[in-house]
Image (spheres, rainbow, N blue to C red):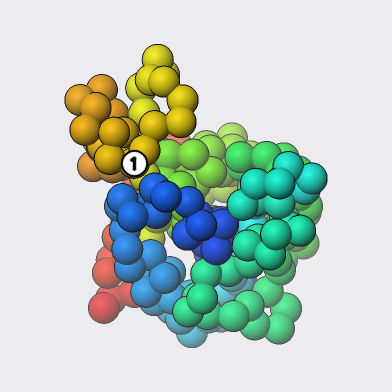
């Protein structure tokens, strides 16, 4: 086992937010499932990561019940780690590195939600830790990002109408430019699964 698929934050929390209506990849579940199936068939490891913000009262507070995999995502199989993080990357507040090291993993394949946030950050940290990183852009998802000076509390329609808002296509393109050849190899689900 030299490779591990890391599925980051594909959780119900995101579907509870208004901006889920503008998600870049409505088929994130299908794409992740294809990677999970291929990874398991190859005898490699799948690691499940959930983002948690205990005591915040937000959709990431486990007390509200949304810190769980999105319905339809393959259930973790026996022996597949499920880790809970409180940082953006999947390493800093978990024992992910220890689990990968114990299993001899040298390559991580990154998928999940949000492309430029937890997924990209995990890819960068993994690279710095010495892993070979493959970033599967079409098995990630993100949402439009408001300009830093935008007023708080706007509706999704107002955010999308603002010309300063970064579109999901712009975010994905920027992430691929930032990662490719520096921190990760950028790949597609089809390239990795052959289907």
Q: Residue at x 39, y 32 (%)?
A: 154
Query: From the viewer's perspective, is residue 48 above or below residue 34?
Result: above
Quarter of the rendering containing residue 31: bottom left
Q: Nearer the viewer, residue 157 or 123?
A: 157
**Residue that carries the numbered disc 1 in the rendered image:** 156
Which image quarter holds the C terminus? Answer: bottom left
Quarter of the rendering containing residue 125: top right
33 relative position to 80: left or right? left
Q: Position of residue 137 (x, y in %)?
A: 34, 52
Query: From the viewer's perspective, is residue 137 above or below residue 191?
Result: above
Query: From the viewer's perspective, is residue 90 above or below residue 35?
Result: above
Disc 1 crowd, CA 10 A, few/some/many (<14, 14-19, 20+): some
Q: Nearer the viewer, residue 18 or 38?
A: 18
Q: In the rendered image, is residue 134 in sight?
A: no
17 relative position to 173: left or right? right
Q: Residue at x 46, y 47 (%)?
A: 114
Q: Residue at x 78, y 52 (%)?
A: 95
Quarter of the rendering containing residue 82: bottom right
The residue sitting at the top extreme is 149
Q: In the rendered image, is residue 112 in sight?
A: yes
Q: Position of residue 28 (x, y in %)?
A: 38, 65
Q: Nearer the viewer, residue 7 or 50?
A: 50
Which image quarter holds the N terminus? Answer: bottom right
Q: Nearer the viewer, residue 118 or 1?
A: 118
Q: Position of residue 11 (x, y in %)?
A: 55, 62
Q: Position of residue 33 (x, y in %)?
A: 43, 76
Q: Residue at x 46, y 25 (%)?
A: 152
């Amino acid at each position: 086992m030299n490779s591990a698929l890391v599925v980051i934050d594909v959780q119900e929390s995101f579907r509870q937010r208004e901006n889920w209506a503008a998600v870049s990849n409505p088929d994130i579940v299908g794409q992740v499932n294809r990677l999970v199936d291929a990874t398991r068939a190859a005898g490699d490891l799948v690691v499940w990561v959930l983002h948690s913000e205990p005591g915040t009262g937000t959709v990431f507070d486990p007390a509200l019940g949304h810190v769980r995999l999105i319905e339809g995502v393959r259930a973790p199989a026996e022996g597949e780690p499920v880790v809970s993080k409180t940082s953006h990357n999947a390493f800093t507040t978990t024992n992910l590195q220890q689990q990968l090291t114990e299993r001899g993993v040298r390559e991580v394949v990154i998928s999940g939600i949000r492309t430029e946030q937890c997924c990209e950050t995990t890819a960068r940290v993994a690279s710095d830790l010495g892993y070979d990183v493959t970033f599967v852009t079409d098995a990630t998802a993100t949402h439009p990002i408001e300009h830093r000076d935008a007023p708080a509390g706007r509706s999704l329609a107002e955010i999308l109408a603002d010309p300063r808002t970064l579109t999901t296509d712009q975010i994905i393109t920027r992430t691929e430019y930032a990662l490719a050849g520096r921190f990760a190899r950028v790949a597609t689900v089809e390239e990795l699964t052959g289907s």
